[in-house]
Image (tube, grey):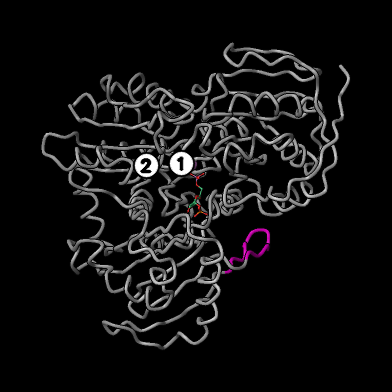
């Protein structure tokens, strides 16, 4: 089979963001757009010859087309084997596991996560390295640099492979193995959690509802919750993946899971509600009468992880992204383990996990995970919650309140302003950055005094690399914080994220309404950054 070398010209916009390259489908459909990017990835890797590549995605529109292209380009570049999830499906954490489990060189994860899909929606391509995690900045920068100079890519003239038949097929000199996307992942979960205890919980009449949002977790959730753990049929809703997510928005937050939230707030509702996003790495956790913020969830999971078999010997440390609340810091302090604050995006956790310095990681954006893979993992978080509920025999609300009574409560919210004009957003951030040096010591309403103000820079303690300008932090003397940064995953205009946090001690008031508790911080943020004034918006697009 002769390798074809096809001439091409660069696209200027192939710079990976927080989590790979994400664009409108129409952008990916331009001639050679996918080919250029994938070839740029392979050109940035060493020693692909004969190695294994994992390929899979969240099943969104264009997934199948991009996979066929990726397979041919991989074969033409000398990979020896490709492992592809049946139907082109692999959740992001399952892809991470397959890479590790099979000692693959890396993997291509095709997803735009929680963004809508379909011909008018978004698509994405991300490269994960051999540890199963998103490529570090060193590689993503090399890929971008290569994409700016690329003049040809390699491919083969072969027919499409059958993505629906399990087993081996040949593409040139490369073997393509179509694998069950769920089996290895479900096996991994059984090594971490007490499935008998969780089975007992369901047998005792405990009721859960899990919303797969017509996205990738459907098959995983049916297999794990209903088949293996004995939850009644119907526990998993919206469990059939659809290329358009049934025209929905697969973001598991209180906006897109409002119905489930409302159900959990009624006495007739189930005991526990959970959901995951397009590619299965995020999680939403709601107990009866209790929404658990992702930052609290991270802290509670870390504090209780030892109740699950996979973590029975305790955890080595916790890492959280900078905008995530400091609730986990208090748990780390009490456990006497390391706490690391990293920039937004899972790629920054990889080194800490590989070095064994942390076991559990989390982000305020509904991402939690551990050293079992190198991605955040939605179903893992749900299973750890279930394991904890099964052992403690308490409800979610009781566990959350108990946590606050021990550690105090970090009231927390995020206000997103989406599709803001890029220039307006950039100027806003620049102007605020310019004011930072003068802020410490300033006193705002409610006697709020600024303790520090900076633009977060991260120094990776494992490989010594530095990442500057990762978000503006304004900390107050009482432990409150305002954080502001621009999203690195948006596909239209700019998204401004404003993160607000206020600490209330263990013996303090834990029953305030979150938005009211953070009201004065919202006003201080407006005084400092002028988001409403500059964008002309009177309210955020999304509040989480
Ligand atoms: C967002 C979140 C970040 C998360 C990233 C990818 O990034 O804030 O915490 O890691 O999405 O998540 P940004 O740059 O838009 O704030 V996912 O589920 O899209 O892979
Ligand atoms: Co995701």
Q: Name the residue rendered at 45%, 60% in the picture.
A: 337
Q: Name the residue rendered at 46%, 29% in the picture.
A: 244
Q: Name the residue rendered at 87%, 30% in the picture.
A: 5
Q: In this view, does 87 lie to the left or right of 196?
A: right
Neighbor class of circle 2 (other Cα within 10 Å; few <14, some 14-19, many 20+) is many
Residue 528: image location, x then y, percent: 42, 78
Q: Do the residues labelled 2 and 1 touch (CB within 8 Å)?
A: yes
**Which structural element holds mark 2?**
loop
> Residue 408 occupies which quadrant of the picture?
bottom left
Q: Nearer the viewer, residue 350 or 313?
A: 350
Q: Does the magenta stretch include residue 163?
A: no
Q: In this view, does 112 lie to the left or right of 231?
A: right
- Per the image, the residue denoted by label 1 is 114
Q: Magenta stretch: give its range.
A: 457-467
Prevailing SS of the magenta stretch? loop
Marked residue nearer the N-terminal end (2 or 1) = 1
Residue 154: image location, x then y, percent: 82, 30
Q: Does the magenta stretch include residue 460?
A: yes
Tell me the quadrant of the picture where the N terminus can be found: top right
**In this view, which residue lies farthest toward the left?**
267
- Per the image, the residue denoted by label 2 is 252
> Residue 30 occupies which quadrant of the picture?
top right
Q: Nearer the viewer, residue 429 or 474?
A: 429
**In this view, which residue lies farthest toward the front?**
536
Quick check: 222 above or below 101? above
Is the C-beta of the residue carrying label 1 under 8 Å from the nearest atom of ligand 2?
yes
Quick check: 445 above or below 279? below
């Amino acid at each position: 089979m002769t390798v074809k070398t096809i001439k091409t010209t660069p696209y200027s916009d192939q710079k990976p963001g927080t989590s790979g390259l994400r664009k409108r489908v129409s952008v990916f459909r331009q001639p050679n757009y996918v080919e250029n990017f994938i070839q740029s990835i392979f050109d940035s890797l060493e020693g692909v010859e004969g190695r294994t590549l994992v390929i899979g995605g969240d099943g969104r529109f264009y997934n199948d087309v991009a996979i066929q292209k990726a397979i041919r380009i991989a074969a033409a570049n000398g990979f020896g084997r490709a492992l592809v999830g049946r139907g082109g499906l692999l959740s992001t954490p399952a892809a991470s596991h397959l890479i590790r489990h099979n000692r693959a060189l890396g993997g291509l994860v095709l997803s735009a996560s929680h963004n809508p899909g379909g011909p008018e929606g978004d698509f994405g391509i991300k490269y994960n390295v051999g540890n199963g995690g998103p490529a570090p900045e060193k590689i993503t920068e090399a890929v971008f640099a290569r994409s700016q100079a690329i003049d040809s890519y390699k491919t083969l003239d072969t027919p499409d492979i059958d993505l629906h038949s399990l087993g081996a097929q040949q593409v040139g000199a490369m073997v393509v193995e179509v694998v069950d996307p769920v089996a290895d992942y479900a096996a991994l979960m059984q090594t971490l959690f007490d499935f008998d205890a969780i089975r007992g919980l369901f047998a005792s009449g405990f009721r859960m509802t899990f919303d797969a949002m017509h996205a990738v977790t459907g098959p995983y959730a049916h297999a794990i919750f209903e088949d293996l753990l004995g939850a009644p049929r119907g526990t998993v809703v919206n469990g059939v993946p659809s290329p358009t997510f049934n025209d929905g928005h697969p973001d598991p937050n209180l906006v897109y899971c409002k119905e489930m939230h409302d159900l959990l707030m009624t006495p007739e509702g189930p005991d526990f509600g959970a959901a995951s996003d397009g590619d299965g790495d995020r999680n939403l956790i709601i107990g009866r009468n209790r929404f658990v913020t992702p930052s609290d969830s991270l802290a509670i999971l870390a504090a209780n992880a030892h109740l699950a078999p996979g973590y029975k010997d305790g955890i080595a440390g916790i890492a959280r992204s900078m905008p995530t609340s400091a609730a986990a810091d208090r748990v780390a302090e009490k456990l006497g383990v390391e706490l690391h604050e990293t920039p937004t995006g899972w790629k920054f956790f990889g080194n800490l996990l590989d070095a064994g310095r942390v076991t559990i990681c989390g982000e305020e954006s509904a991402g939690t995970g551990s050293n079992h893979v190198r991605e955040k993992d939605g179903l893992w978080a749900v299973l750890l919650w279930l394991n904890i509920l099964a052992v403690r025999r308490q409800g979610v609300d009781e566990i959350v309140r108990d946590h606050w009574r021990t550690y105090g409560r970090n009231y927390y919210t995020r206000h997103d302003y989406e599709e803001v004009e890029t220039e307006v957003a950039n100027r806003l951030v620049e102007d605020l950055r310019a004011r930072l040096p003068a802020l410490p010591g300033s006193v705002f309403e409610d006697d709020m005094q600024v303790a520090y103000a900076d633009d977060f820079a991260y120094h990776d303690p494992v490989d010594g690399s530095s990442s500057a300008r990762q978000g503006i932090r304004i900390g107050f003397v009482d432990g409150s914080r305002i954080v502001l940064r621009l999203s690195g995953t948006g596909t239209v205009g700019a998204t401004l994220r404003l993160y607000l946090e206020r600490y209330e001690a263990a013996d303090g008031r834990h029953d305030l309404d979150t938005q009211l508790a953070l009201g004065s911080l919202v006003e201080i943020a407006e005084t400092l950054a002028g988001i409403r004034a500059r964008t002309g918006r009177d309210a955020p697009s999304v509040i989480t």
